[in-house]
Amino acid sequence: MGYNVVVVGATGNVGREMLNILAERAFPVDKIAVLASRKSMGTEVSFGDKTLKTQDLEQFDFTGWDIALFAVGSDATKIYAPRAAGAGCVVIDNSSLYRYDPQVPLIVPEVNPEAIMGYSKKNIIANPNCSTAQMVVALKPLHDRAKIKRVVVSTYQSVSGAGKEAIDELWDQTKGMYVPGQEKAPNKFTKQIAFNVIPHIDVFLEDGTTKEEWKMVAETKKIIDPSIKVTATCVRVPVFVGHAESINIEFEEHLDEEEARDILREAPGIMVIDKREDGGYITPVECVGDYATFISRIRQDSTIDNGINLWCVSDNLRKGAALNAVQIAETLGNRVLKKG
């Protein structure tokens, strides 16, 4: 016996990826519904070898459905997630709306699966920000061994994290560099993204950080340990898919780089590719379509006591969004619903 599953926002990048991953991982589905806004109603999407037509989110009745994977913005989620939750359908939300709500668990299954039991307070589970998700997968096994004091992270985030319009803008601007008359001015981004990097993701806050940077701080504390100090610089780069992060970690006690490498090799969800030679590391283009969070460039930081540097790469549409949501659904099924 399987689950009745709803995918909300099924025509977007993340919604389509959710459908792909549900099929790839053979998630036990008895019945599935794909929802979108009224303007996209009737659009066809793929689910394994099936083709499904989207239904109107506004008119949908969530009664009798077990799990709803939400891949829409916070505005729509604010309206429809409580409606689904109130009908007895557990919501797994990919927006930022509920991440900082103390009554809603923020889950990365490799890191804090036990926290999922808190879902019952609102019948909602939050999926973290894409840049946070891959980082905490790397941090948690190291934190368990030698408690982390401080993290300094710089991100190199692909344009797909900003949606289809961002992907189109990078493509159009790149073509425009070579084809006279096809130049494309910035629209989705504040500056040209093609052949450029932009140290600005989301809005600026009063202290000079951006909201994306604030998210990484707040979410890491909620998921792993509120005592960890985190400082982040988040940068958009001209890559279509795949986020990369340079992470500097300061521990309370010494952790040798060889032991750190061994710990990460054994940790769930991680693939260590770390050879000190040309090409002995993973880049974003190589991680696309993969489930793993890849770790490379593990090395001691001699400038601080108890420091380690590492390079972390993951497919942001998968681990950063759709895969993590499906893994939450799997964890929910195994620990709570137990129908599959």
Image (cartoon, rainbow, N blue to C red):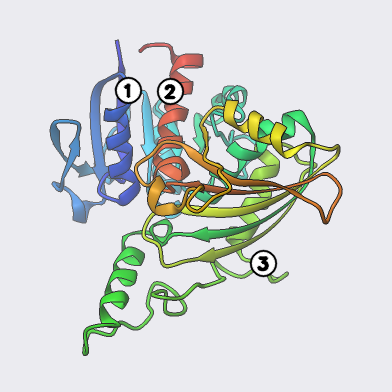
* Quadrant occupied by the N terminus: top left
The residue to which callout 1 is attached is 27
- Residue at image coords 24%, 28%: 32
Mark number, residue 265: none
The residue to which callout 3 is attached is 209
Pick the front one: 115 or 85: 115
Element type where label 1 sits in the image? loop
Q: Is residue 21 visible?
A: yes
Provide residue 36's location: percent of width, then percent of height: 26, 47
167 over 61 or under it: above or below: below
Question: Alpha-carbon distance for marks 3 and 2?
Answer: 35 Å
Nearer the N terminus, badge 3 or badge 2? 3
Element type where label 2 sits in the image? helix
269 over 280 or under it: above or below: above
The residue to which callout 2 is attached is 330
- Residue at image coords 51%, 48%: 281
Q: For residue 26, what is the image quadrant? A: top left
Question: Alpha-carbon distance for marks 1 and 3?
Answer: 39 Å
Q: Amino acid at mark 1?
A: Phe
Element type where label 3 sits in the image? loop
- Residue at image coords 58%, 22%: 117
